Each structure stands twice: as structure tokens, then as C-alpha cells.
């Protein structure tokens, strides 16, 4: 069952600032993402994109500013506390257990999300409640047929699909995705783009991604981050038309010319 859209932004970031000594990695950044909206954050290497996601997820505490999730100020909450509220993230590098099967990885994610007590341990795949949730998540990302396959035998792209399944099994309300298509072939990227098109109908999503074709295909709005500061925010059409954005990419015409 799909929840009704929330009123107002699901995620709201207000005036985030983060310094490491003289290095300012986040400079007064404000972003809002509505339910079932996908906002992409783009920018050159070193722009502060991943540092921003770390602060939203709770891995880094900002020097100043606030993060609101579902109307609650979560700025000082831990990663685990945010995850329990439904704010989930994936990483640039896949984090899976290679010797376990695809299904075992997804089921472990269900267990660690609070669906069952570790102290009440019994053989994992006998936990029908968790296994059913894992199967549903694998089916939603197109990995149902690989459920019994050891992770060490699946492709890189399928690992990224599994990582998404491991987030979905925790019943998120919002997804933070940090370069989910990094290192993928064009064919693998196309699978993830199609998957994200389906997921954005269910959740709000903040996407960090260098694949401009994917960004312009998926994003409802795009935020351009440069040197830790928001240069411009707008629709894909507005981003394509913005001369300052193109100059940041050293005249890269792939931004202006990307297909809608």
C-alpha cells in the first residue's frame, strides 16, 4: 500500500555550514524535497556533494544550520535514529556480504532495521516475516531470480540493485542516493534509471550523480553545488539554459545538449 503524499517538504535543509579548519565544504546550503519528488545535486569534483549527504544522513554534524525530516528537527540525531524515522541512504561503494546469498543480504537488512530482535536469534531464513519482506524488496528491484545466488557471483550493476533492495526492506520514507550509477556500464545504468523512475513514485529522493543523461531523465529539480555553495537551482530545462552552470563544467555541452 502506497502512503498518501505528505504535505510540505519531506526533507528540508536550512543554511547548512560545515568547515574543516580553513576549508569550507558546505557554505549556507538550503534544499527542500517534497514527497515523490526527485531532486538531483550536481557539481564538479570537490563541490561538497557527498559532504552534504553525510550531514543529511547524520554521519557528519554541521557547524550550523538545520536538517528537518517529516517536519522534525533531526540535526542532532544519529544515523540510526534518522534511519528508524525512514531517512535511508545508499553509498558510492556497495556494502554487501559477498559470501551470503542475495536473499540473505536483504533479510539481514530487514533484521538490522529493527524488524526483529537480535537476541531472539534463530536461523535467519526461518524468519518468514523477514524473508517475505526481503523477497518483496528484491522483486521491486528486479532481483527475484537471483535470490539464491551468492553475492560474489552477481554483476556489479546487480550489486547496486541489491543495495537499493537493502534500503527498501527498511520501509523508507525518503532515499539519499550517492552516485548509484558510479562505475556502471551504459546497460547497467539504464536498469537503475528505470528502477529510480519507479521508486520516485513512492518516495522523495535526493540523488547525487555524475551521469548527466540519468540526471536529466530523472530529476524534477536540479541543484548545482560549487565550492560548497548552491550556484543555481531549477528545473532541467532551466539548468540547460543557464550559462553559468555550463561554465562550471568547462564548456561541457553535454549539459546543454542532454535529451529531455
Image (cartoon, helix red, strand yellow):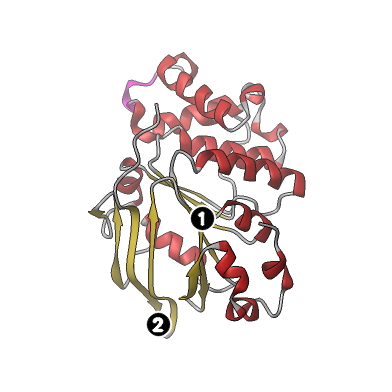
Q: Residue at x 71, y 50 (%)?
A: 184
Q: Which quadrant, please, contains the C terminus?
A: bottom right
* Residue extending furthest toward the left: 72
Q: Position of residue 249 (x, y in %)?
A: 66, 76
Front residue of this view, candidates 16 and 129: 16
Asked where in the image residue 214 lies, by quadrant, the reply is: bottom right
Residue 34 at x, y = what percent? 38, 52
- Label whose residue precedes the other's in the sequence (1 or 2): 2
15 horizontally vs 162: left or right: left
Q: Which residue is mark 1?
A: 220
Residue 209: give x, y in percent of width and height: 59, 59
Image: magenta residue range: 117-121
For the point 57% across and 43% down, the residue is 197
Give the CA distance from mark 1 to mark 2: 35 Å
In the picture of the structure, the residue carrying the numbered disc 2 is 21
Q: Is residue 109 above or below residue 64?
A: above
Q: Is residue 59 visible?
A: no
Residue 59 magenta-highlighted: no
**Residue 92 at what x, y percent from top left?**
58, 54
Of circles 1 and 2, which is in front? Answer: 1
214 to the left or right of 56: right
State the predominant SS element of the stretch in magenta.
helix
The local secondary structure at tag 2 comes to loop
Q: In terms of secondary structure, where does tag 1 sit?
A: loop
Amino acid at each position: 500500500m502506497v502512503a498518501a503524499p505528505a504535505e510540505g517538504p519531506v526533507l528540508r535543509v536550512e543554511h547548512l555550514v560545515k568547515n574543516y579548519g580553513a576549508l569550507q565544504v558546505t557554505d549556507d546550503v538550503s534544499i527542500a524535497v517534497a514527497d515523490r519528488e526527485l531532486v538531483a545535486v550536481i557539481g564538479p569534483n570537490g563541490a561538497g556533494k557527498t559532504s552534504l549527504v553525510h550531514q543529511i544522513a547524520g554521519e557528519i554534524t554541521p557547524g550550523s544550520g538545520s536538517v528537518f525530516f517529516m517536519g522534525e528537527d533531526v540535526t542532532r540525531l544519529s544515523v540510526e535514529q534518522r534511519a528508524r524515522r525512514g531517512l535511508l541512504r545508499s553509498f558510492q561503494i556497495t556494502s554487501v556480504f559477498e559470501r551470503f546469498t542475495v536473499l540473505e543480504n536483504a533479510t539481514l537488512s530487514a533484521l538490522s532495521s529493527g524488524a526483529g530482535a537480535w537476541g531472539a536469534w534463530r536461523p535467519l531464513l526461518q524468519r518468514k516475516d523477514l524473508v517475505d519482506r526481503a523477497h518483496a524488496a528484491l522483486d521491486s528491484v528486479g532481483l527475484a531470480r537471483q535470490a539464491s545466488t551468492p553475492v560474489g557471483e552477481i554483476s556489479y550493476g546487480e550489486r547496486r540493485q541489491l543495495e537499493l533492495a537493502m534500503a527498501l526492506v527498511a520501509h523508507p520514507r525518503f532515499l539519499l542516493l550517492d552516485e548509484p550509477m558510479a562505475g556502471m556500464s551504459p546497460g547497467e545504468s539504464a536498469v537503475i534509471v528505470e528502477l529510480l523512475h519507479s521508486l520516485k513514485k513512492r518516495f522523495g529522493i535526493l540523488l547525487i550523480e555524475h551521469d548527466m543523461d540519468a540526471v536529466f531523465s530523472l530529476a524534477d529539480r536540479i541543484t548545482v553545488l560549487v565550492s560548497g555553495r548552491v550556484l543555481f537551482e531549477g528545473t532541467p530545462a532551466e539548468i540547460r539554459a543557464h550559462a553559468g552552470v555550463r561554465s562550471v563544467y568547462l564548456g561541457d555541452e553535454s549539459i546543454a545538449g542532454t535529451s529531455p
